[in-house]
Image: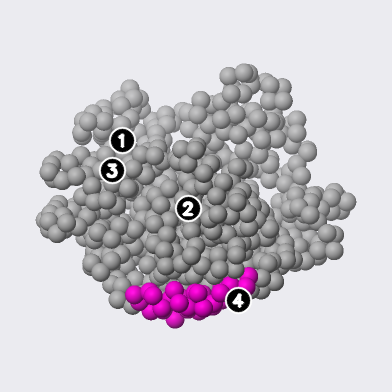
Amino acid sequence: MLESIKGIGGKTVHVLAEYGITTIHDLIHYYPRRYESFYLSTLQEADGQTAQWFKAMVKESPKLYSVRPKLTRITVKIVIENTEFTVAFFNQNYLMRILLKGTNIAVKAKIDPKISAINGLQIKLFENFKTGIMPIYNIEGISDHKFLQFVQSGLRLEGHKAEENIPGDIRIKYKLIDRKALLKQVHQPQNMDSLNAVYRRLKYEELWLYQLNVQWLKYQRTHDQGHPKAYQIELVRDFVKTLPYELTEAQKLATNTIFKDLKSHHVMQRLVQGDTGSGKTIVAFLALLATMSAGYQVAFLAPTEILAEQHFNTLQSWLSKTPYQIELLTGSMQLNEKQTVIDKLKNHSIDGIVGTHALFSHATQYAKLGLVITDEQHRFGVNQREKLKHKGQSPDVLYLSATPIPRTLSMTLFGDMDLTIIDEKPIGRKPTKTMLMPINEARQLNTRIKETISKSQQVYVIAPRIDDSDADLVGIETLNAYYQKTFPNLRIASLHGRQKAVEKDMILRQFKQHKIDILIATTVIEVGIHVDNATLMIIFHAERFGYAQIHQLRGRVGRSALQGHCVLLYRGDDTVKKRLALLETIDDGFKLSEEDLKQRGFGDVLGTLQSGYSTFQYSHEYEDLKILKLARDDAADFVQSKINKRFTTFNDLLKSIRITNRSST
């Protein structure tokens, strides 16, 4: 029990429970969120790019300025190695009592010795500065030092019980520390070599466990017996003839591949990746239509209610030309409405359902579920997707993703799925015109905004954050106030992640209905929202986003015959400008994601995704792609070696590792 550790009482138990820590095992496995390195640097080592600690002396008393409401700046002159600097601190008024003339301090900052003005990140009285590596846990109400004491006590009590989850031969092959050493060093790395050993182990461990799960699912899928679907191909062909456009070759190839899966004896588990606007929805609909014509039901899962409604309206319109019917099922519907839909689904008086997480609920039952389509599949965890699959008897599964990921990475991440890529845009779709502009010229866009609105078109304004807590970034709050004042007669609204789901859906619905002229938002709008009338997007601080994310964002405009425009407002030097300039000439999401992978690492590529496979905490550098591939091969070999053991669950597979390790030690 946690209470057996000195210093942990009822109040502390409650705080820890909010972080998922309810046992000593949880406590010692709650790893630091990050580390703070407390080593002094010299001006000769300063590069202006890396935050470092320097010993300094306060030369003059500090001065306090009010920049604007809720933002203050303290400036103080300090001396580092006989060189004078003026350092600024924002919203840290308490420093007025600490930065007394003649005081020796340690200051953390990015220092270029040639530039005398710097922004301070952190400060300590030099007498309190201790050299070393400090784990940072970010537990609200419990200091890092106190939490570390709890962990040390927990390790003394239960550290010896640590179970290994990587086979011994693999640890030896890659020279990885064992789990007991990891638990000790992850909380108290003695030096950088120790910390590097921790990261090597953590990176491989999380990729190994991920790939082990992927390979296990792949093994299960290849042994699941599917239900071949005798679909009516003439019905599908007749529908295609009614379309006002011709399918692209990529769409035809994807459709044919899916149809082969539908009539095979194996369960389909296929990921269809397509750039924004590539026409994945019509491909998914043809699979839906074929499945319904074979007498089965279809579940179409969307991550948000607004997207579910969007898909429902589109699919219902297409189905009006067929004998099949679908209904919408979302969490916000009235109980009696939900029950009516569920009853229809259960007695097979409807052929399909479009909805959100409500499709997972225990109450939702299907008469004959044959196909599950998951839009933006990365927004749902593996367990959620598996739960929906088990609503039927081995239904086929089709995943859709508009987030382009390099083929090599996709095949490694989604090794349990077959992969289809739609790499053509529909004929006549105009690429969004993209241009760069320094952020200090943003006011020049006001005329363009007026012109856009005067044509009864709409505008997106994207901000990197909600508030203005970072003095270097413009947040939604500031932009909203500015545009409300600049355009008092326009209908302006803001949208961000702190709003409740109901409020977000309402705002998006109003924007789709053209009850809002300018929508100021964070990246919550980046995937799936389809507003034909939106033609202009302005992205503030584009330097803070990756290629793939900007490409997803600009995919929200130019979704009709109207020309879309995207303006990237950036702050930075020629290097930043050169990086962003690629977006002016390349409109291929897959090429851009390759560049993201090279420049920012696959952690960043995945970082634009919300949940599902975006679970890696430690693996984010480009080099880690090599580790991911090694882990994939190791996991595939391990699962293959255990097939004759006839494990029924993934946990049984993990247990075999522990048993093997115990017997070998």
Q: Main secondary structure of the magenta part?
A: helix
Tell which of 179 and 565 is nearer to you: 565
Based on the picture, tell me whether residue 251 belongs to the magenta stretch.
yes
- Colour convention: one colour
Q: Nearer the viewer, mark 4 or mark 1?
A: 4
Tag 4 residue: 260
Tag 3 residue: 494
Amino acid type at circle 2 is Glu
Read off the magenta span. Answer: 229-258
Amino acid type at circle 4 is Lys
Tell which of 433 and 117 is nearer to you: 433
- Marks 4 and 1 sit apart, C-alpha to C-alpha, by 63 Å
* Residue located 66% across and 53% down the image: 390
Which of the labelled discs sits on residue 89, or is there none?
1
* Residue located 21% across and 44% down the image: 492
Q: Is residue 157 left or right of residue 196?
A: right
Q: Nearer the viewer, mark 2 or mark 4?
A: 2
Tell which of 256 and 543 is nearer to you: 256
**Label 1 crowd (10 A; few <14 / some 14-19 / many >=20):** some
Residue 257 locus on image (x, y percent): 56, 76
Amino acid type at circle 1 is Phe
Q: Are marks 3 and 1 in contact (CB under 8 Å)?
A: no
Q: Are marks 2 and 1 in contact (CB under 8 Å)?
A: no
Q: Are marks 2 and 4 in contact (CB under 8 Å)?
A: no
